[in-house]
Amino acid sequence: MIIGMSVAAFTTLHVVISLVGIASGIVVLVAMLAGKAPAGWTALFLATTILTSATGFLFPATGFTPAQGVGALSLVLLAVALVAFYGRRLAGAWRWIYVVTAVPALYFNCFVAVVQSFQKLSFLRPLAPTQSEPPFQIAQLVVLTIFVVAMIAAIRKFHPEQTPVARLEPSAS
């Protein structure tokens, strides 16, 4: 049992949270490339990506695993992204700091999704049973390339000064 759930139920919850994090992160990344900072989507992306990393530590493990290393690094990046987006409101250098922390956090989720896909999906498993075979390596290289290119483009294009970041406190009406 993990937090009162069977391992299977907790795994399903973790996967759903991860998929929401990836989907909302893609929306946020596309918005960055359009120079926008959608507050609601960003909050959803950051919250679910933090939950994904945090819940990953709750799975039974016999020692520190590579997945936990990715989760720990992701949490550090997400902490900085939170400060950049909410604390510093993307002012000055915090704009690109946000990009270079949020985009890799999304990449890590996608990286793990590729790993899990090759482990769990019956049509992919035979292509890379040890995850050292070319199909797995090519898939990971393609994902990495997409994210590096997207991050560089976002650093150049993400200037949401014209679209203010939503305030944390409710507006007085």
Image (spheres, rainbow, N blue to C red):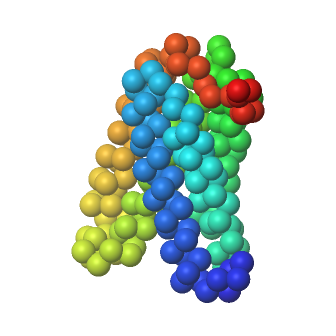
Left or right placement of residue 121 versus residue 113 in this view: left
Q: Quadrant of residue 145?
A: top left
The x and y percentages for residue 85 are: 65, 30
Residue 130 or residue 139, whichever sits in front: 139
Image quadrant in which the C terminus is located? top right
Q: Quadrant of residue 33?
A: top left
For image coordinates 51% across by 75% down, the residue present is 12
For image coordinates 65% across by 36% down, the residue present is 81
The x and y percentages for residue 115 are: 42, 64
Residue 58 or residue 131, whichever sits in front: 58
The x and y percentages for residue 72 are: 67, 54
The x and y percentages for residue 86 are: 70, 31
For image coordinates 55% across by 71% down, the residue present is 13
Residue 152 can be seen, yes or no: no
Residue lying at the far front in this picture: please name it: 173
Image quadrant in which the N terminus is located? bottom right
Residue 151 can be seen, yes or no: yes
Q: Quadrant of residue 55?
A: bottom right
Q: Is residue 15 above or below residue 166?
A: below
Q: Is residue 108 above or below residue 86?
A: below
Q: Is residue 24 above or below residue 13?
A: above
> What number of labels is visible?
0
